[in-house]
C-alpha cells in the first residue's frame, strides 16, 4: 500500500507573529490568526475550561520572565 504524501503549508499569525502549519492552502493567508490571538481579540467568546486558561497564563508569564532575563 502506497503512503499518501500531504503537502504542508506554513503561515504566520498576523497578530502574534507565531508560525503554524496546515495541510490545506488558505484562501486568505493575510487574515489567519492563531487560537490564542483569536481569544485575545474576543475574550467574551473564550469558552475554554479554566484549567486550560491557567496553563496558558502560566506559560505566557514563564516566557516573559525568560525574555526579561535574556535581554
Image (cartoon, rainbow, N blue to C red):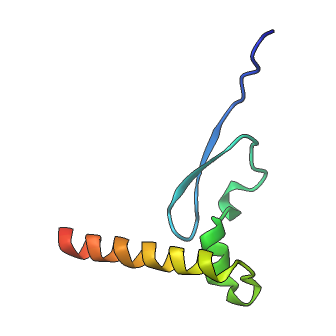
Indicate whether 52 appears above or below 43.
above
| Residue 28 coordinates in the image, percent (x, y) | 75, 56
Indicate whether 61 appears above or below 10.
below
Question: Residue shown at 75%/49% (left/top)?
Answer: 26
Q: Quadrant of residue 37?
A: bottom right
Which quadrant is home to the N terminus? Answer: top right
| Residue 15 coordinates in the image, percent (x, y) | 56, 71
Q: As drawn, is 56 to the left or to the right of 65? A: right
Which quadrant is home to the C terminus? Answer: bottom left
| Residue 68 coordinates in the image, percent (x, y) | 24, 76
Front residue of 59 and 40: 59
Front residue of 10 and 6: 6
Question: Residue shown at 34%/76% (left/top)?
Answer: 64
Indicate whether 64 appears above or below 18.
below
Q: As drawn, is 34 to the left or to the right of 28? A: left
| Residue 9 coordinates in the image, percent (x, y) | 65, 40
Q: Quadrant of residue 5?
A: top right
Q: Is residue 71 visible?
A: no
Determine the residue located farthest toward the bottom in the rendered image: 44
Q: As drawn, is 14 to the left or to the right of 63? A: right
Q: Quadrant of residue 41?
A: bottom right
Determine the residue located farthest toward the front in the rendered image: 51
Front residue of 26 and 46: 46
Q: Is residue 31 visible?
A: yes
Indicate whether 33 appears above or below 8.
below
Question: Residue shown at 51%/60% (left/top)?
Answer: 18
Please tell me how many numbered marks the rendered image carries: 0
Amino acid at each position: 500500500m502506497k503512503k499518501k504524501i500531504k503537502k504542508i503549508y506554513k503561515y504566520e499569525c498576523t497578530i502574534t507573529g507565531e508560525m503554524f502549519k496546515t495541510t490545506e492552502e488558505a484562501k486568505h493567508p493575510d487574515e489567519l490568526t492563531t487560537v490564542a490571538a483569536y481569544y485575545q481579540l474576543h475574550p467574551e467568546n473564550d469558552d475554554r475550561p479554566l484549567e486550560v486558561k491557567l496553563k496558558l497564563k502560566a506559560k505566557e508569564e514563564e516566557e516573559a520572565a525568560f525574555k526579561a532575563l535574556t535581554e
